[in-house]
Image (spheres, rainbow, N blue to C red):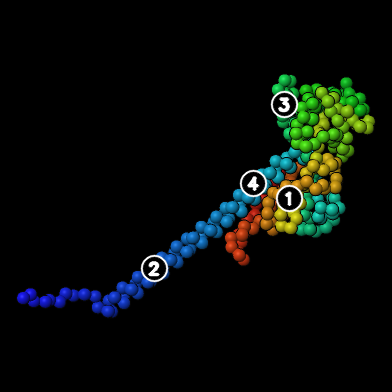
Amino acid sequence: MKKLSLKPAFSMIEVVFVILVLGIVSSIGAEIVANVYESYIVQRGQHRASIKTQLALNQITNRLKHTIPQSMGRRIGRTGTFELSTETMANDSNLYTVLQWVGTDSDSFEASSSASRNPGWSGFADIASSTSTLIQSPASDFDLTNTIQTSLGRTGNFALYFPRDFVAHTATGAGSTITLDTPSTRIVERYKIAWSSYALVVENGDLRLYYNFAPSIAASIGSSSSLLLKNVTNFKFETRGQTTRIKICVKEQISEGFSIPSCKEKAVF
């Protein structure tokens, strides 16, 4: 007959103590995991907001660098009074929500004909062989310009600008010749052409780019637009000389009642 022997085991106090320790460790671990996850969510929100703002600024920069000199202005709302950026502000700077300018035709200027290798328009005029209504522009291929702009949905007349001249000369082009609708008393060797004005407008918290309206200074803003950025909380701009500084702030919604702010600023020369 075997003799029973007792083996040592955990006492109730020891079991309670172990459970207590495990509870403390698990609570600390859960808090660490929660903090790591919360930090990840915040950083992801900041990254998304930063990327979105940077992409919008890059698009704005690409447009602004082709601005017709002295054509930039501001408005309070789409239908507000147009003020040239060179003029003193008539109102508080915080009230202006629209930045407007005339943009050169960069699409056909940077393109070239496969046959002649000439750009759509060269930007140079031969004064000696030009008249008040017919401007000869060597190394230009306005047939290519017309083809490109037709593909972009634009037809008819464009605006021709001479340096230090606020007049938008209505014109058409064919071959290497520009035909003005009305005679010009001032023709110089350099020019730029434009098919559209552009405007950055903040509406209902969204930043939109308006385009395809008259390529003249202070033109009424049309209806064609594309969304650049949502949830914009601040849109500021300032022009000094040939430099425009833009600041955009947005918020990235993380959860209901909680959002991450992000601000970026860029100068365009």
Relative image position of residue 169 (x, y in whole percent): 88, 35
* Numbered mark located on residue 112 in the image: 3
Distance from the alpha carbon under mark 4 to that under mark 1: 13 Å
Label 4 sits on residue? 55
Q: Helix, strand or loop at disc 2?
A: helix
Label 2 sits on residue? 26
Q: Residues within 10 Å of mark 4 (few under 14, many from 20)?
A: few
Q: Helix, strand or loop at disc 4?
A: helix
Q: Residues within 10 Å of mark 3 (few under 14, many from 20)?
A: some
Relative image position of residue 90 (x, y in whole percent): 85, 56
Residue at horizontal 11 percent and vertical 76 percent from the top: 4
Q: Is residue 92 above or below residue 178?
A: below
Residue at horizontal 71 percent and vertical 57 percent from the top: 205
Q: Quadrant of residue 60?
A: top right
* Numbered mark located on residue 182 in the image: none
Q: First in sequence: mark 2 or mark 4? A: 2
* Numbered mark located on residue 208 in the image: 1
Q: First in sequence: mark 4 or mark 3? A: 4
Residue at horizontal 29 percent and vertical 75 percent from the top: 15
Distance from the alpha carbon under mark 2 to that under mark 4: 43 Å
Instruction: Decide if residue 47 is on the left or right side of residue 96.
Output: left
Distance from the alpha carbon under mark 4 to that under mark 3: 28 Å
Distance from the alpha carbon under mark 1 to that under mark 2: 50 Å
Q: Is residue 222 above or below residue 26?
A: above
Q: First in sequence: mark 4 or mark 1? A: 4
**Hey, what amino acid is under mark 1?**
Arg
Q: Helix, strand or loop at disc 3?
A: loop
**Hey, what amino acid is under mark 4?**
Leu
**Hey, what amino acid is under mark 2?**
Ser
